Each structure stands twice: as structure tokens, then as C-alpha cells.
């Protein structure tokens, strides 16, 4: 049986710690955050905006990465699993970085994290079928 899906249809279940219920992944909200960050602007937003975006993106990724690794376990030994594990390690290494004080640099960091979030979201929502 697959993960629970809300009646609205935009939530996916993320694996949680043993003994706890799974957390819903609100795909629509994550996509909105990604689109907000990746919208081209004539000048970089304030560093406070970038700090808020960074917090949202790292929060989204904190839900998505466990789901990605769960999918990787289900597909152990496949190219998908290898990509998922490598991708999770790559993204985790960048999530904890600080938001630079320079607004252009902060915007660049957020845009990079948004692209990574978009990729992880795609890997989670488009995971191959397990046949189970």
C-alpha cells in the first residue's frame, strides 16, 4: 500500500520516525515557494526576504529528504536509488549553510536551494513504482 494522500490531493506522506504518524508533504505549498524564489526580479530582494525563503526551503527539504531516502530503500540497487542517495547527501551539505549578508549572494544561495528543492520534489513525487 502506498503513502496516504489527503482528500485535497496535493499532500504526500513523508516517512516519520518509528512510532509516529507520517507528516504530510504539501506539494502545492512547496511549489509555490520554489516559484516565488525562482521568479526573476530586476534586483535582488532584501536579505530578510532571502532569510525567510531559506528557512522555508530548508523546512521543505527536511520533509522531502526522508521521503526520498525511503524511496531509495524501496529501489535499492537501482540507478534511481543511487541518484536519490547522492542527491540527498548533496542537498544536506548545502542546507545548513548561512545566508550571506550581501543581498545578491543571499539571493543566489536561495535560488540554488530552490532548484535543489524542485529536483528533490520531482524525485519524491515521481518515484518509480515498486510493484508492492
Image: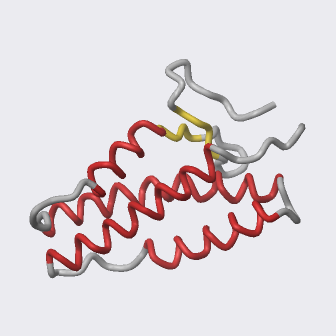
Q: Is residue 24 left or right of residue 81?
A: left
Color encoding of the figure: secondary structure
| Residue at position x 61%, y 43% in the image | 125
| Residue at position x 54%, y 37% in the image | 24
- For residue 83, above or below residue 67: below
Q: Quadrant of residue 66?
A: bottom right
Q: Is residue 115 left or right of residue 89?
A: left
The N terminus: image quadrant: top right
Q: Is residue 94 left or right of residue 131?
A: left
Of 54 and 116, nearer the camera is 116
The C terminus: image quadrant: top right
Q: How many marks?
A: 0
Of 132 and 58, nearer the camera is 132
x%, y% of residue 37? 28, 56
- For residue 64, above or below residue 13: below
- For residue 80, above or below residue 100: above
x%, y% of residue 29? 38, 40
Amino acid at each position: 500500500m502506498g503513502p496516504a494522500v489527503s482528500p485535497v490531493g496535493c499532500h504526500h506522506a513523508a516517512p516519520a520516525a518509528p512510532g509516529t504518524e507520517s507528516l504530510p508533504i504539501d506539494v502545492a505549498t512547496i511549489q509555490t515557494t520554489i516559484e516565488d524564489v525562482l521568479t526573476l526580479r530586476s534586483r535582488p530582494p532584501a536579505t530578510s526576504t532571502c532569510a525567510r525563503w531559506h528557512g522555508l526551503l530548508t523546512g521543505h527539504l527536511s520533509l522531502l529528504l526522508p521521503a526520498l531516502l525511503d524511496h531509495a530503500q524501496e529501489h535499492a540497487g537501482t540507478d534511481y536509488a543511487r541518484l536519490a542517495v547522492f542527491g540527498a547527501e548533496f542537498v544536506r551539505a548545502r542546507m545548513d549553510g548561512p545566508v550571506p549578508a550581501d543581498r545578491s549572494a543571499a539571493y543566489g544561495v536561495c535560488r540554488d536551494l530552490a532548484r535543489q528543492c524542485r529536483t528533490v520534489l520531482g524525485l519524491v513525487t515521481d518515484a518509480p513504482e515498486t510493484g508492492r
